[in-house]
Image (tube, helix red, strand yellow):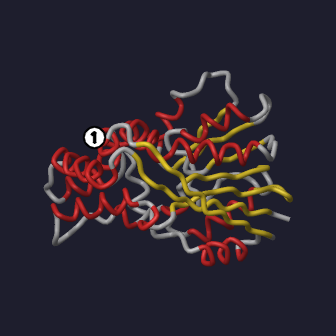
Amino acid sequence: MSDKADRFTGSIPEHYDAGLGPHIFHDYADDLSARVAALNPQKVLELAAGTGIVTRKLRDLLSADAHLIASDLNPPMLEVAKGKFRPDERVEFKQIDATNVEFADGSFDVVMCQFGVMFFPDKHRSYREAYRVLRPGGSYIFSVWDSWDENPFARIVHETVETFFPDDPPGFYKVPFHYCDVDEIKESVLRAGFCSVTTEHLPLRAKIPSAPRFADGLVFGNPLFDEVLSRGGNPEDVKAAVASAIEKELGGEMTLKALVIHASRD
């Protein structure tokens, strides 16, 4: 996996879950989990499950006897996710590289992934792996972010951080919002073997109840934190500047847009 994806460690998972979850992930998790549950699957694999935001919502929607496996490359993220479940709930947690899935062919009814594919270094290989572990007739449902233009909070963070390091700006926010070309994604998914692919742009209006809390997630809840430290910066100063910029440019709410892809295996 990429060096951007494998550094969700240390205190990052907690900041990610508390700071980013309520602002940009929870509403999309409601949508994605409902799409998966509507298929009534009995065995589901979630890739790049992170801190279990979608996992928790999906477990509440699946039938009681359905088996859900939540996987991520980063064990610290999964440790936060585990804390959201009782021991008797049918959720299994595994460290898995989405480009090298350990399960046998045809193991799952549905594979799902919310906002993780953008980080996979070999996206086409990840699609082939999803196809391989799906049973005939199974579905891969995943989402990616649309561009900066459609998700202005990301542009604001990048531009704000750039003022601290004009000669060597951190590049993290270029990763999640630059894999959104519908034709490119569909071509790669179909080439992986899927028989059909549908795509849907999904815009949302999201509240920003606390700009400082949101900024905490935006700076401390992903590898940007390490990028700031490696350049000799003070993450608290960056956080304060991001919070001010968010408050000034967005106020109490923002527009978001994701792309949801549903690929079917014949």
Q: Quarter of the image containing the C terminus?
A: bottom right
* Three-letter amino acid code at the position of disc 1: Pro
Q: What residue do we see at 33% from left, 48% from top?
A: 251
Q: What residue do we see at 42% from left, 54% from top?
A: 6
Q: What residue do we see at 30% from left, 57% from top?
A: 157
What is the x, y in percent for residue 30? 62, 42
Nearer to the camera, 65 or 74: 65
Q: Is residue 64 left or right of residue 244?
A: right
User: Quadrant of the rendered structure where residue 209 is?
Assistant: top left
Q: Is residue 231 left or right of residue 192?
A: left
Few, some or many residues within 10 Å of mark 1 (<14, 14–19, 20+): some
Q: Is residue 154 left or right of residue 64?
A: left
Instruction: Assign a secondary structure to mark 1.
Output: helix
User: Quadrant of the rendered structure where residue 166 is?
Assistant: bottom left
What is the x, y in percent for residue 93? 59, 38
What is the x, y in percent for residue 202? 60, 58
- Residue 129 higher or lower than 252, as above or below: below
Q: What residue do we see at 68% from left, 65% from top?
A: 199
User: Quadrant of the rendered structure where residue 181 is?
Assistant: bottom right
- Residue 212 higher or lower than 121, as above or below: above
- Residue 97 higher or lower than 39, as above or below: below
Residue under pointer 1: 212
Instruction: Please count the marks in the image.
Output: 1
Q: Is residue 74 left or right of residue 38?
A: left
What is the x, y in percent for residue 79? 48, 34
